[in-house]
Amino acid sequence: MRVEYINPFVEAAFNVLREVLDDEVKRGELYLKSTSQPVLGVAVIVGLTGDVEGRVLFDMKRDTALAIASEMNGEELATMDDLAKATISELANMITGQAVTKLHDLGFKFDLTPPAIITGENMEVSNTGVEALIVPVELKSGKLEINVAVRERT
Amino acid sequence: MSTISSGELRREEAEKVENIDYKMVTFSLAGKDYGIDIMKVKEISKAKRFTFVPNAEPFVRGVYNLRGDIISMIDLRIMFNLPAAKQGEQSFEDMIILRLDNFLIGVIVDSIDKVVGINSETIQPPHPIFGDINIKFIKGVVENEGRLYLILDVERILDDHTEDKTSSPAPKLVREPRGGAEREKAEAERAGEVDYSFVIETLATFLGFYVTDHNRRWVKDRFDRWKQIRGENGKEVQLQEEQDAREFLSSFFSAYNQRFWGEDYRDAFKALFSDFDHEGNFLVWNPGCGPGYETYSLAVALKELYPDVHLKVWAHDQDLMNISTAPNLVFQEPDLPEYMLDYSSEGKNGLQFSKEIRDAILFEYHNVLHSNPFPEVDVIVSRDLLSFLKEAEQEALVAEFSEKLKPGGVLVVGDHEEIKSPDFESISSGTLRAYRKR
């Protein structure tokens, strides 16, 4: 993954999370992965096109997703209903959107696709042929993993 | 639907293990694996014929003269009531010399295995059903590569017993072990082998440097010289801490490591392409590029050689800190060899490379052992990268080099590395070590 892409994603994630959650957000060590990995329970996918091809995946446990959605809506949400799903999708959209804006300022042209949310038990995600950058984020309500897999168009 | 495969879990586990912050010397007692914190271990060695001390506890085998220091020897097997294979007087036994607060003590074990690096978070507390050894002597249990190690708390074990022994004025009463020069020599040779294999193990655990066919010749030479230098300075041959390991490897790195190439190296590099006619695209792969000095150097050299080709360099490293500054590398004029001046321009904080050079290079945060999604290249420059991969990974990467290089393409490796593969013929130039793909 091109070095210039890393920072915009990390910065956008932290700016947005700090703003919407109004809480301490800790960053874990970044690392690379090229194997398939389990999905924690709730995953949002945002596709990227343009100079690159790939996708960003936000992965968290159900409880974490509910806690984030509750905080963002200012009310307690107990089930993963439409409102909760829409809220989590929006969060993914905000983070990816901000990252793409930052990248645009650096001269890289990206477009994004509308987010898709996937929930369920025992799922895994595979990146065939593309390695993913993992940005682990520690929130008070649990762990959020941002999994960025993009490659240059050749 | 599909569940997490066990391979997946193992890989997760492996990632946890990668964060190594605790190292231990492992050994076996009665067929079980044990470990001792490496910070407590002064050295390991082989010895025989300990001088018997009358009226001592049964587990005290005697005292031993270690290059002038008299140390007590304790047999852990007897101490823990484990079956000890009866050894003849003449056979060597493995021992570990421990450095506790203010004294040295030797323990005899069945056989010493290796140094294992683990993440201290993976150490689990001992469980009461470990029957063989009193639980209060066990610091914890850890699993590594499918083996379970019990980590011994040596201070607990040896503290009570050793107090009076070390204070006794033993030295004067001890006779030098008899046997003459011949046995000494044999012992030294044995010790030399132990030292060598221990050095190899410690290089791997401290710095992730793996000795294989790709670098063995250098390591052997270096070890002989190292032994001599350390001997002259009265220091231990074994590498006891990371600093020692760094010193051992200090002369391994290629010329102009982490610096721009000087003219001599550039010319040697250019000479590799003397019969290489080229137009159109010129593709280069630079795995393990670090902070980018090497990448820029080779890009400038190739630009000088082939001003009209479309140069494209993929530069990869998996050290994020190192590579993150590479795309916009800023440097000062004195650091730059004169021939490169034409390719740089004044930026905000110092000199930068021209857009032409920067646009030719794509720096990526990438693990080269993952799939490498780019077309076949004309040149691969991979100095001092192979040796820092595990043996199987080294083989995989050499195979990948062969796969990714066009026929007739050039592979440059570290000055002290070599490739032994039927796919490559050597075309070294100066100190630069290079191969051409057949």
Image: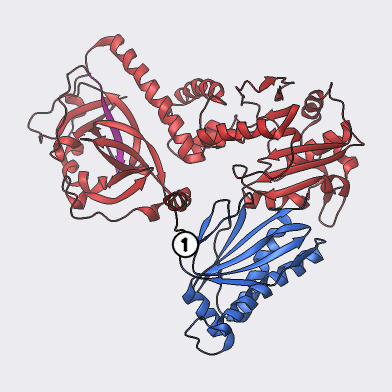
Chain colours: A blue, B red
Q: Position of residue B428 (x, y in %)?
A: 71, 20
Residue B370 visible to an observer of this rendering: yes
Image coordinates for residue B234, horizontal then vertical, percent: 43, 26
Name the secondary structure under disc 1: loop
Q: Find out whether residue B413 is within the magenta segment.
A: no
Query: In the picture shown, does residue A49 fall above or below B361?
Result: below
Q: Nearer the viewer, residue B373 or B93?
A: B373
Q: Amino acid at mark 1?
A: Met
- Residue B93 within the magenta-colored segment of the rendering: yes
Please, which residue is most extreme toward the left here?
A: B55
Tell me the magenta residue range.
B91-106
Residue at the image point whose x is 66% and y is 72% from the top = A115
- The residue shown at (18%, 32%) is B169
Nearer the observer, B278 or B163: B278
Q: Is residue A14 left or right of residue B169?
A: right
Name the residue: 21% across, 33% down: B72
Q: Is residue B423 above or below residue B32?
A: above
Give percent across and percent down for residue B144.
37, 45
Above or below, A116 relative to B428: below
- B158 vs B191, left or right, is left
Residue B238 relative to residue B154: left or right: right
Q: Quadrant of residue B287?
A: top right
Q: Residue furthest right?
A: B308
Quadrant into which the C terminus of chain B falls: top right
Q: Find residue A13 and report its image quarter.
A: bottom right
Q: Residue furthest front?
A: B1
x, y (%) of residue B432? Answer: 71, 25
> Callout 1: 10 Å neighbours few (<14), some, many (20+)?
few
